[in-house]
Image (cartoon, rainbow, N blue to C red):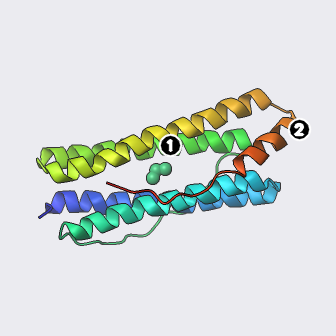
Amino acid sequence: MISEKLQQAFNEQINKELFSEYLYLAMKNFFEELNLPGFVNWFDVQMQEERAHAMGLYSYLLQRGGKVTFEAIDKPVVTGTCPLSVFEQTLAHEEFVTSRINALTDTADEDRDRAAVSFLDWYIKEQVEEEDNVRKIIATLKLIGDDKKALLMLDKDLATRTFVAPVIG
Ligand code: FEO
């Protein structure tokens, strides 16, 4: 049975992942307004990934006999004002999520809950991938600068991203 403290930490992370989904919905909407369908698609896939991350934690907590509790989800605020700054905000958010996953794993470790530590390993690896994907797009956007043609080419590229339901754990 999972400890009360670890259960609370799992519930907090479920909330963070659902907030991530909500934030990426707001970013998707930002790109709808810019009329960049490839960027819209990228954030749509990103949203679906966040929902899958939340549901992975949800299912695991239930599987361990824990109790899922829901708190309010914060209002998503897009602070970025252009494609580059929105992706910089995305990276900062993913780095924050990484720090929360690490803290959750530390709590599981303090509990000597080997099963939870092993389960969370998937999330640690996923965060490396998430941050890397976003960093690469930031690097491309920096190269693009004010070149509208190049931005439309990146938009075409981002339109090819598809959601593949992850096998978590
Ligand atoms: Fe669920 Fe993008 O981390």
**Marks 2/1: CA distance?**
26 Å
At x 25%, y 70%, the residue is 62
Secondary structure beneath disc 1? helix
Q: Residues within 10 Å of mark 1 (few under 14, many from 20)?
A: some
Q: Residue furthest top?
A: 143
Q: Earlier in the sequence, mark 2 or mark 1?
A: 1
Q: How many marks?
A: 2
Where, by quadrant of the figure, is residue 75 drawn?
bottom right
Residue wearing tag 2 = 149
Position of residue 49 measured from the top left corner of the image (x, y, whole percent): 51, 57
Q: Is mark 1 within 8 Å of ligand 1?
A: yes
The reply to whether the C-beta atoms of the residues labelled 2 and 1 are less than 8 Å apart is no
50 sits left or right of 7 in the view:
right
- Placement of the C terminus among the 4 image quadrants: bottom left
Which residue sits at x=28%, y=71%? 68
**Can you see residue 82?**
no
Q: Residue 68: in sight, yes or no?
A: yes
User: Left or right of 134: which side holds 52?
Assistant: left
Residue at 62% across, 55% down: 162
The residue closer to the viewer here, 49 or 22, is: 49
Image quadrant assignment for residue 128: top left
Depth order, front residue of 138/155: 155
Report the amino acid beneath label 2.
Lys
In the rendered image, the quadrant that contains the N terminus is: bottom left
Q: Which residue is mark 1?
A: 130
Q: Does residue 153 sit above or below 3 in this rendering?
A: above
Query: Which amino acid type is shown beneath numbered disc 1?
Result: Glu
Disc 2 is placed on an element classified as helix
Where residue 48 sits: x, y (%)?
54, 62
Residue 54: x, y in percent?
41, 62
